[in-house]
Structures are given as structure tokens and as C-alpha cells.
């Protein structure tokens, strides 16, 4: 009778009159547990976030409680499981279980073994794991092994003990990736990574002071600010175990190249980079380098591009951890509504950078990958010679360990 009356137009009014209907259309997960809805034509009841095709609101009835939904005599939807935990909750639980298995295993478990342990097919498990964590099970396992190696070395274990305790079957496999994992040799890391030499120089741009610092692998930091001394202290905080040394006059030319790139992004930046971060951060930064100058994207869009749509907050945190201002263009990430959000070097600098890139057009060379140099056009002649705009602060030039003086 209910179905007949609805079809005859004598049933209850359309669900669109209910203020909760937009939350059903949006599949709002935050609404789950606060109300339910049933669909007359299919004979099922669902939670608001149900992924099934949207029902005709004329056939929908909303319920304040699960008991009310059950009282219709309809069956629970098999896709959203309104009687129990949501699919998202179940997937989060199985991914958490898989992570614990990876962390507790002496050797890296296979995809098939992990999928069997959580009761899912390998393909489904792989897809869910990547959507929630932002990385594949294999990448997560590799990151955990690297963390175990770092912990073992820092705890005073021998290099050999740390390698095998972390699950490496041979030292050869470890040493093939050791520099990528540790940024230095295992013996130096075990000693606390002392005396890694970081050269730096400070210059001026239209955005204020700029600090450029390099390791043997490439440019490791580009920092922006108002106070040169504060930038120098910030560098020491970011690399606390390194020997931070003021660059010589020749290093000034490198600063000039970076300044030229900031002032005119279309020239590109032909310098190698030493990009340090977790596996997830590296994936976020890689996605940022693909954003053309003049464009902006949201944090949620970056999360979608790295196939981790639920990791929006983690994407924002990765942007905040970026050591390479402008070269890794986290300034091109904005809120969903287009509003400017926080920027490590100041929202006003972010606004100026975006306005500048928009006015200069989109024909810009992409940022180089870590450890590689990008091909770019030559810098303006004044910047190549180390003009006053890019001149390094002389009190730091060639002076080792100036930053280790008491603050």
C-alpha cells in the first residue's frame, strides 16, 4: 500500500523538503549515525553516505533512528551496511591490522599474505590500502624497514645487526638503497650524522630575505623571511647535526640562480636538489611539481592525484614540511573554495607569488626531480653576475660554524 500510494502521488511529500536531503545527495559521512533513509522502490534502507546511485527523492523516506528504518520492513542495503560498521570503518580497521602485521614481521610480507590475513582479495586490499595510507603496502613496508634501520643504528647496534634486524636478507640489497634511506653512509648515521657539511648564503629578493643551502647532493633548503639572522637559525634547526658553513663568493652565483627563478619562474631552475622527507611527503611534493605556474589546486585534489583521497590533512602537513620554497611549489595549493590558506613563509608572500606567476603566464619549466638538474633558459645577465639583488650577506661568507654561537 505504501508503494502504491507513493506512485499515485498521495504519499508523503518529497524528501527534498527535508533539510537533511542535501547530506544524502552529498553522501556526507559525517551524517552517518544521525539519521537513515529508506527507498520505497528498492525496498532497502541506507545510511546517508551510501555509495549507491541516488534515489528519486519522491521515493525516499527519512528516519530519525535505525529502529524506525527497520520498522519499514525493508532489508538493509548491502553496499552501505546500515546495521553495522560502515565500509570505511571496516576498511580502516583492516588497513590498521595490515600495518601492524608489516611492522611486526621479520621479513617483508607479500601482498597475497597480507590480503589473506585481512580476508580480502589482493587487488581489493591493495586499492584500499593505498586509498587510506597514500602508499602501497610494499612502499609502506620499505619505509618501516628504513625506520627500523635508523632506530637500530641510533641505538648503537652494529651496521650488520641493524640491517638484518630490519628484515634485509642481504647487506647488498641494503647498501643499494642506503644513501636514499639515510642520506649518508650507515657508519656516519650510526655516529649521529655529525659534520655533514651544509653550505649556505643569504640574499635579497622582492619577497624579502632568501637563504639557499646545499649538501653534496644538491640544494637542500630554500627559505624565505624578513630577518636574515632568523633564517640562518632556522637552517640550523632544520639540520641540527650538520656543520652549517657560510658559502664562499662562488656560492653567491647559486643564490642568484634561485633568486632569478623566484622573480621569473619561466626561466626554470637548473640545479640538482637534495629532497628529504618520508615516502608520503615525497609523493605529495612530486605532485606539487606537476602543477603549472599560474594554476592552483586544492589539498583534496592533490590527495586525489596521489591516489590517497582520504589523506587531505596529511597532504597539508607535507606542504608545511617543505624545505624548498617555490622550487617545490606548495604555494600553488589553496583551499577548496579558492581562498589562500596558511603558508610557511607567510600568506602575503603566497599571494604575491601566485599573482606573479599568473601575470607571467604558464610557459614554465617543471621543477627538476631530486638529484637531477632541469634544462632551462639562461638567467638574466645581472643575476648571472650576482647582482645586488642576489648578493649574499658577507658576514656569513666562508665562515664555518657561525650558527653554533650561543643565541
Image: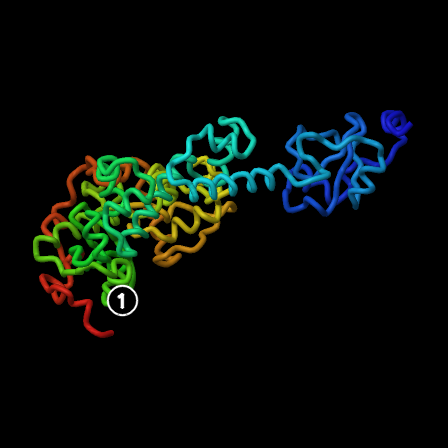
Q: Percent x, y for residue 238? A: 28, 58
Numbered marks: total:
1
> What residue lies at 72% left-to-right and 31% top-to-bottom?
77
**Residue 232 on image: x %, y %:** 23, 63
Q: Quadrant of the C terminus?
A: bottom left
Residue 8 in the figure: left or right of residue 222: right
Taking the image as shown, residue 121 lies to the left or right of residue 27, namely left
What residue is rendered at 43% in x and 55% in y? 342
* 230 relative to 383 in the view: left or right: right
Q: Residue 225 location in percent, x, y? A: 29, 61
Of residues 269 and 300, the one nearer the viewer is 300
Q: Is residue 402 above or below residue 61?
A: below
Residue at the outermost bottom position: 406
Neighbours of disc 1 within 10 Å: few (<14), some (14-19), many (20+): few
Instruction: Indicate how the structure is coloured in the image.
Output: rainbow
| In-front residue for pair 142/385 | 142
Quarter of the view holding residue 393:
bottom left
The residue tagged 1 is 230
Amino acid at each position: 500500500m505504501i508503494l502504491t500510494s507513493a506512485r499515485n502521488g498521495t504519499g508523503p511529500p518529497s524528501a527534498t523538503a527535508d533539510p537533511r536531503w542535501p547530506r544524502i545527495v552529498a553522501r556526507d559521512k559525517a551524517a552517518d549515525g544521525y539519521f537513515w533513509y529508506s527507498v520505497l522502490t528498492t525496498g532497502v534502507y541506507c545510511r546517508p553516505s551510501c555509495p549507491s546511485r541516488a534515489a528519486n527523492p519522491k521515493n525516499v523516506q527519512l528516519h530519525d533512528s535505525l529502529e524506525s528504518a527497520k520498522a519499514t520492513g525493508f532489508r538493509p542495503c548491502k553496499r552501505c551496511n546500515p546495521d553495522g560498521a560502515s565500509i570505511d570503518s571496516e576498511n580502516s580497521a583492516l588497513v590498521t591490522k595490515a600495518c601492524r602485521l608489516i611492522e611486526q614481521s621479520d621479513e617483508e610480507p607479500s601482498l597475497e599474505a597480507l590480503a589473506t590475513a585481512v580476508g580480502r582479495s589482493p587487488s581489493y586490499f591493495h586499492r584500499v590500502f593505498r586509498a587510506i595510507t597514500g602508499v602501497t603496502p610494499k612502499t609502506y613496508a620499505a619505509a618501516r624497514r628504513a625506520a627500523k634501520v635508523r632506530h637500530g643504528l641510533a641505538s648503537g647496534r652494529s651496521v650488520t645487526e641493524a640491517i638484518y634486524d630490519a628484515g634485509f636478507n642481504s647487506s647488498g640489497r641494503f647498501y643499494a638503497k642506503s644513501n636514499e634511506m639515510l642520506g649518508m653512509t650507515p657508519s656516519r648515521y650510526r655516529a649521529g650524522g655529525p659534520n655533514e657539511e651544509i653550505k649556505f648564503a643569504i640574499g635579497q629578493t622582492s619577497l624579502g630575505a632568501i637563504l639557499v643551502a646545499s649538501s653534496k647532493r644538491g640544494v637542500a633548503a630554500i627559505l624565505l623571511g624578513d630577518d636574515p639572522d632568523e633564517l640562518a637559525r632556522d637552517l640550523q634547526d632544520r639540520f641540527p647535526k650538520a656543520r652549517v658553513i657560510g658559502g664562499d663568493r662562488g656560492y653567491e652565483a647559486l643564490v642568484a640562480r634561485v633568486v632569478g627563478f623566484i622573480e621569473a619562474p619561466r626561466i626554470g631552475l637548473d640545479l640538482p636538489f637534495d629532497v628529504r622527507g618520508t615516502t608520503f611527503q615525497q609523493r605529495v611534493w612530486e605532485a606539487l611539481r606537476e602543477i603549472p605556474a599560474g594554476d592552483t589546486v586544492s589539498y583534496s585534489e592533490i590527495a586525489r592525484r596521489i591516489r590517497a583521497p582520504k589523506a587531505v590533512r596529511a597532504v597539508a602537513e607535507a606542504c608545511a614540511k617543505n624545505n624548498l620554497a617555490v622550487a617545490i611549489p606548495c604555494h600553488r595549493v589553496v583551499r577548496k573554495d579558492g581562498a589562500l590558506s596558511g603558508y610557511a613563509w607567510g600568506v602575503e608572500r603566497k599571494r604575491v607569488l601566485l599573482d606573479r606567476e599568473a601575470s607571467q603566464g604558464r610557459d614554465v619549466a617543471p621543477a627538476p626531480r631530486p638529484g637531477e638538474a632541469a634544462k632551462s633558459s639562461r638567467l638574466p645577465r645581472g643575476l648571472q653576475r650576482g647582482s645586488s639583488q642576489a648578493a649574499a650577506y658577507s658576514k656569513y661568507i666562508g665562515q664555518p660554524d657561525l650558527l653554533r654561537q650561543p643565541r
